[in-house]
Amino acid sequence: MKRRRSSRRTSGHIQRAVRRSLRKIKPFWVFKIILYGLGIYAFFYSEREYAVTLISFQTIVTIGVVTGLIASIFIEREFKYYLFSIILLGSLCTAGLFKFNHTFAHAAEIKIKPRILSKALQSAKVERSHVTIEYDDFNKDIPVEHIQEYLLGSSEFIALTVRKGALGYYIITYKELVKQ
């Protein structure tokens, strides 16, 4: 019987200690943890969406840095966390841009046929086969599917089926290597 009483006393003591510890956590820290968790997810989402959107890397970096800097000024109080905050909050804003562009995209698909500037076959140094095109005064790497790698050497163009997004950036829905 004595054992039973002490275990109840110990569990009650632990519950009170947990409650005291939870009271010490400020709601602002919970908000920041959730926000930074979303920022990490948004970073990988932005990376995925960038691969299928015809937008320059410079535009994405500029939007991310500017919006991340503005958001960091309002959220962070200590200067030493600014770089981390700029990256994650900037990723959150660029993910919002991609989501808006993709969600409200036009249903009509059009085909564009840009010339291939360079080609890279998958190797130890190159993660995935891709072609580089020039579109709207910027270069973009377009990954090539494994099924179409045999056409990589002889193709001069890539036929892209795209939909125009809400912000005017094209979203690639299908790509095919073309010889002429």
Image (cartoon, rainbow, N blue to C red):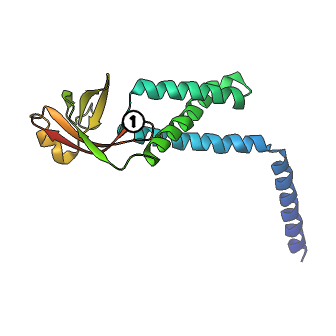
The amino acid on which the numbered mark 1 sits, given as a three-letter code, is Tyr
Quadrant hosting residue 125: top left
SS state under label 1: loop
Q: Position of residue 62 (x, y in %)?
A: 49, 24
Q: Position of residue 113 (x, y in %)?
A: 20, 35
- Choose between 84 and 143: the one closer to the eye: 143
Q: Which residue is mark 1?
A: 169
Q: Residue at x 85, y 49 (%)?
A: 23
Tell me the quadrant of the picture where the N terminus can be found: bottom right
Quadrant of the rendered structure where residue 132 is? Answer: top left
Left or right relative to 102: residue 138 = left
Q: Which quadrant is home to the C terminus?
A: top left
Residue found at x 84% / y 45%: 24
Q: Residue 65 location in percent, x, y?
A: 54, 25
Reply above or below: 115 against 14.
Answer: above
Lateral position of residue 95 relative to residue 149, left or right? right
Q: Nearer the viewer, residue 105 or 91?
A: 105
Residue 143 vertical placement versus 147 (above, below): above
Give 70 or 168, whichever is nearer the viewer: 168
Q: Residue at x 47, y 26 (%)?
A: 61
Q: Residue at x 20, y 46 (%)?
A: 146
When asked about the image quadrant of residue 149, the answer is top left
Task: List x then y, in percent, for residue 166.
Answer: 44, 41
